[in-house]
Amino acid sequence: MITLHMVVLPFLITLFLLLIIKFLPMNVPDKEKLSPYECGFDPSGSARLPFSMKFFLVAILFILFDLEIILLFPLAWALNSQSHSNAIILASVFVIILTLGLIYEWLKGGLEWTE
């Protein structure tokens, strides 16, 4: 059963928050606020440095194979169950799919550091 305070209280809280937002000062960034801070000195160079996509690829591959290991950990508990063959088949299919993906990436040249 819906009571009056279940309807009115959320409405009042919402109205209160909208009023607070309306009366808070606006944040207007200027040149000084948008510049990088370097101990009071003018910046000596750009704050944005170029990023090599090779490092990004290595990080993604690390995360992928790290997750593979995490997903294979429950295999030890699955082998204690009665269906050993199902657990081994599922783990083998999982590892084969990831290995095929790694071979594909290798053949496409995604793991080459020199161009």
Image (tube, rainbow, N blue to C red):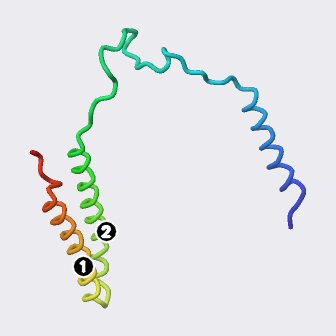
Q: Is residue 58 above or below residue 96?
A: above
In the image, is 95 to the left or to the right of 114? right
- The residue identified by callout 2 is 71
Q: Quadrant of the C terminus?
A: top left
Q: Residues within 10 Å of mark 2 (few under 14, many from 20)?
A: few
Q: Residue at x 28, y 81 (%)?
A: 90
Classify mark 2: helix, strand or loop. helix
Count up the numbered dots. 2
Q: Quadrant of the N terminus?
A: bottom right
Observer-nearest residue: 93 or 43?
A: 43
Looking at this rendering, what residue extends furthest in the top direction? 41
Q: Percent x, y for residue 73?
A: 28, 69
Mark 1 or 2, closer to the camera: 1
Q: Residue at x 24, y 73 (%)?
A: 97
In the image, is 94 to the left or to the right of 110? right
> In the image, which disc is placed on residue 106?
none
- The residue identified by callout 1 is 93
Q: Percent x, y for residue 104?
A: 18, 65
Q: Residue at x 21, y 50 (%)?
A: 58
Query: What's the distance in space between the residues labelled 1 and 2, CA to CA?
Result: 13 Å
Amino acid type of disc 1?
Val
Classify mark 1: helix, strand or loop. helix
In the image, is 52 to the left or to the right of 18? left
Q: Percent x, y for residue 89?
A: 24, 84
Amino acid type of disc 2?
Leu
Q: Residues within 10 Å of mark 1 (few under 14, many from 20)?
A: few
Q: Percent x, y for residue 74?
A: 31, 73
Quarter of the image for residue 53 reads top left
